[in-house]
Image (cartoon, helix red, strand yellow):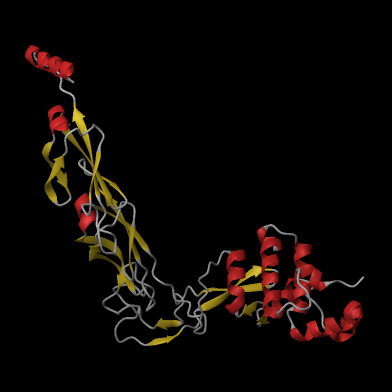
C-alpha cells in the first residue's frame, strides 16, 4: 500500500512549503531519537519530508498518487530511508564523510535537539556574557532617584591589542583549522556533522602569528571597572536596571554583554510603600481626637502639619495628595495615607480619673 506522506506530516496538498516545513520541524522535535523518540517513526517523517519538502518530488508525488512507489523505483526520486539520506538532503558531504549544513532554517531545530543553543552565527564570534549584580539604596534614594557608582571585576577589552588578540605589529592570518569560517564540523553520529565554534581561533576565523602577551590571544583581560549608574526616581525594591554594553567584553571584536542591576531598597521604619503611595501612622491624644488640633508628621518632603478635626476616631485615614512617591519615568506623584491612632492614657492619677468619670457622666 502506498504511503500517504501528507497524512504522515499532518498537512494537505494545499499546504504551503513553509507550512510543510514547520510541520516537519514540529514532528522532528517530538520524535527524534536524541530526544527519546522512536527512530522508525522519525524515518517515516524524514521520508515524507524528503518528498513533500522538495518541489519537484512533491509535484511527481501529486501526479502519480497511489503509484508513486512504482514511479520512484524507476528513478522518480526516493525519500529518506536512513539518516544519511536525511543529511544529504540538507547538506553537502565532504571528503571526511561528514555533512555541512546551511543553518538558516535548521539552526533552531538542531540547536534544541543537540544542545547547541540559539547561537549559530556564521561569524562564530562569541558575544560577551551578561552580568547580574545587586545594589542597595535608601528609601529616599528610591523615591527621588540618585546617582551611584558600582565597581565590577569583569572581562574587558585588552588595551594592548585593542581586542584583536594579536601582539601589536604581528601578522594575522586565516585560521588553518577552520579555513576562516570560524566553525568546524562535529560528528554527532548517524552520518551527520554539525558546526561548532573553532577552538583554535575562537570563532573569529583569524589567527595571529604571535599572540598578545597581555591577554594571551583572548582579546580580553580581567579588569575592575567603575560605572556611574543613574537610579530613576520611583524605582521599587526588586526592580532591575539594564545597562547595555556594560557586561563582559566579547571575543575579538564582538559586542559586549549587558549589566543587569537588581535594586534592593532598604526599609524605613517611618514609611510603608504600596506602589506609589506612602502609608504612615500618627498617634494623637484623647483630647486631640475630641477637640481637634494640629500635629506634626513625617513625610518624604520632611516635617509637615496635619490638621485634626474635632471628633476624629482612631483608625481614621487622611489622604495627602501628591505627597507619595514620584511616578517612575512619568510625571506626578502618588499620595500619602496617614492613619491616626488615638492613644489611650494609662496610669491615671486619682484626680484624672475623677475628671474622666465626670466627663463620662456629662456625655
Above or below: residue 171 compared with residue 192: below
Q: How many marks?
A: 0
Q: Residue at x 15, y 52 (%)?
A: 301
Percent x, y of residue 313: 23, 32
The front one of 164 and 323 is 323
Q: Is residue 69 above or below residue 264?
A: below
* Quadrant placement of the N terminus: bottom right
Quadrant of the rendered structure where residue 285 is? Answer: top left
Residue extending furthest top?
Answer: 350
Left or right for 69, reference 112: right
Assign the C terminus to one quadrant of the image.
top left
Comparing 20 with 197, the one in front is 20
Q: Horizontal placement of 127 versus 294: left or right?
A: right
Q: Please report the residue visible at 21 percent of the width from the left and 32 percent of the height from the top.
A: 341
Q: Residue at x 43, y 83 (%)?
A: 206
Can residue 138 be seen at all in this image of the molecule? no
Q: Is residue 101 visible?
A: yes
Work out whether residue 195 or residue 176 is closer to the camera in this orientation and state it: 195
Side of 111 where 241 appears, left or right = left
Residue beneath the point at 36% across and 72% down: 256
Work out whether residue 113 or residue 58 is closer to the camera in this orientation and state it. Answer: 58
The quarter of the picture where residue 89 lies is bottom right
Residue at the front extreme of this rendering: 362
Q: Position of residue 179 (x, y in %)?
A: 52, 84
Question: Does 173 appear above or below 140?
Answer: below
Amino acid at each position: 500500500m502506498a504511503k500517504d506522506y501528507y497524512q504522515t506530516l499532518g498537512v494537505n496538498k494545499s499546504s504551503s512549503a513553509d507550512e510543510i516545513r514547520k510541520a516537519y520541524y514540529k514532528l522532528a522535535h517530538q520524535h527524534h531519537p536524541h530526544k527519546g523518540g522512536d527512530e522508525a517513526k522519525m524515518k517515516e517523517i524524514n521520508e515524507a519530508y524528503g518528498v513533500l519538502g522538495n518541489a519537484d518530488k512533491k509535484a511527481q508525488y501529486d501526479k502519480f498518487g497511489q503509484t508513486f512507489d512504482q514511479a520512484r523505483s524507476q528513478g522518480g526520486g526516493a525519500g529518506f530511508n536512513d539518516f544519511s539520506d536525511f543529511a544529504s538532503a540538507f547538506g553537502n558531504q565532504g571528503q571526511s564523510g561528514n555533512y555541512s549544513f546551511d543553518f538558516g532554517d535548521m539552526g533552531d531545530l538542531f540547536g534544541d535537539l543537540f544542545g547547541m543553543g540559539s547561537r549559530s552565527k556564521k561569524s562564530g564570534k562569541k558575544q560577551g556574557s551578561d552580568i547580574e549584580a545587586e545594589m542597595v539604596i535608601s528609601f529616599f534614594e528610591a523615591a527621588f532617584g540618585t546617582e551611584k557608582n558600582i565597581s565590577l571585576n569583569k572581562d574587558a577589552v585588552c588595551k594592548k591589542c585593542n581586542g584583536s588578540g594579536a601582539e601589536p605589529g604581528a601578522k594575522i592570518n586565516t585560521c588553518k583549522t577552520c579555513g576562516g569560517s570560524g566553525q568546524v564540523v562535529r560528528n554527532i553520529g548517524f552520518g551527520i556533522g554539525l558546526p561548532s565554534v573553532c577552538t583554535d581561533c575562537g570563532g573569529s576565523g583569524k589567527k595571529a602569528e604571535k599572540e598578545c602577551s597581555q591577554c594571551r590571544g583572548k582579546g580580553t583581560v580581567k579588569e575592575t571597572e567603575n560605572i556611574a549608574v543613574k537610579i530613576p526616581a520611583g524605582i521599587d525594591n526588586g526592580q532591575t536596571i539594564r545597562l547595555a554594553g556594560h557586561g563582559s567584553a566579547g571575543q575579538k571584536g564582538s559586542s559586549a554583554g549587558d549589566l543587569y542591576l537588581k535594586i534592593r531598597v532598604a526599609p524605613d521604619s517611618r514609611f510603608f510603600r504600596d506602589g506609589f503611595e506612602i502609608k504612615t501612622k500618627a498617634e494623637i491624644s484623647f483630647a486631640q481626637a475630641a477637640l481637634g488640633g494640629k500635629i506634626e508628621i513625617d513625610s518624604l518632603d520632611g516635617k509637615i502639619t496635619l490638621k485634626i478635626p474635632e471628633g476624629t476616631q482612631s483608625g481614621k485615614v487622611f489622604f495627602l495628595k501628591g505627597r507619595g512617591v514620584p511616578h517612575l519615568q512619568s510625571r506626578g506623584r502618588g499620595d500619602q495615607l496617614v492613619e491616626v491612632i488615638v492613644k489611650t492614657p494609662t496610669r491615671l492619677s486619682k484626680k484624672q480619673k475623677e475628671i474622666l468619670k465626670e466627663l463620662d457622666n456629662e456625655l
